[in-house]
Amino acid sequence: MKPAAKRPHGKRSDRRLVRNRKALLAAAELLIARKGVDRVTVDEITATADLAKGTFYNYFKDKESIAREAALLARHEVEAKVRIAQAAVDDPAERFVTGMSVFLRTAAEEPNRAGVIAQMYGQWLHPKARGNVALGRDLENGYRCGRFSSSAPPAAVVLTVGVVQAGMTRVIALADWRAAQSLAVELCSFVLSALGVRWNEAQTISARTVARVFAADWRTK
């Protein structure tokens, strides 16, 4: 008598679920960055991911939900680089522009990733929004230490998110490393000044920080 056929291992099914979800998110990121969320369809996402349309709804409710998830995932991955870049930095002002610089560098070297973050920026305009934990902590640090004095934290979140979103969009359009670096220095200086740091000091901190971040090699981290 032949032994009963073995059932597919449960982990194989789990791996397929993870693989399908990653494929859908990667497709959404690519298409949203290229076309804008309003012009992308679920059909295009599933075709790019090489999956059936019905599979999409096993993971996401609609196009907006996958766009939000793709942007949040991309932002988390960039923030992992922010944490590396901030590791040895104590000054709250320098830590703050380090974060800005990493996002702007990402736009220069990973335009699809930055593009989906920039296009979905509206979900981070509220200080308590998912994804704003690190930004809020850096701002609170700056106010507590007296490095920041101008504007209230909620307005500072809107200012920072707006400037970084516009900056990433502009860096993608520039498609030039040196121009991106110069723009990053100007934007970081502007935001630090708006937060109460003296202009000359804001420029010095921003130039030093942007140079360091743009020179970093994340592959060794």
Image (spheres, rainbow, N blue to C red):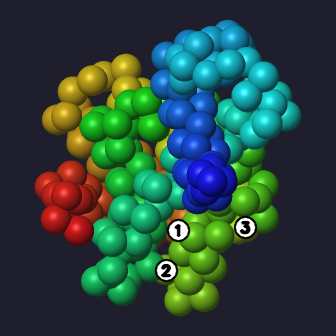
Q: Amino acid at mark 2?
A: Arg
Look at mark 3 in the image and give the residue it sits on: 152
Q: Which element carries disc 2, helix, strand or loop?
A: loop
Q: Which element carries disc 1, helix, strand or loop?
A: loop
Query: In the picture, residue 100 is in which quadrant?
Result: bottom left
Outermost residue, front direction?
1
Query: In the picture, residue 66 is in which quadrant?
Result: top right
Identify the mark at residue 147; answer none if there is no mark: 2
Q: Amino acid at mark 3?
A: Ala
Q: Which element carries disc 3, helix, strand or loop?
A: loop
Q: Rounded to the nearest whole Å, what is the CA distance between mark 3 and mark 2?
A: 13 Å
Outermost residue, right direction?
61
Look at mark 1 in the image and give the residue it sits on: 196
Please tell me which residue is depicted at 19% across the width and 58% down the height of the picture.
Answer: 219
Mark 1, other Cα within 10 Å: few <14 / some 14–19 / many ≥20 = some
Q: x and y percent of residue 13 in the render?
A: 63, 49
Q: x and y percent of residue 2 in the render?
A: 60, 52
Q: For this view, does 17 lie left or right of residue 181?
A: right
Q: Earlier in the sequence, mark 3 or mark 2?
A: 2
Q: Earlier in the sequence, mark 1 or mark 3?
A: 3
Please tell me which residue is depicted at 27% across the width and 24% down the height of the picture.
Answer: 175
Please report contact status of discs 1 and 2: CB closer than 8 Å, yes or no: yes
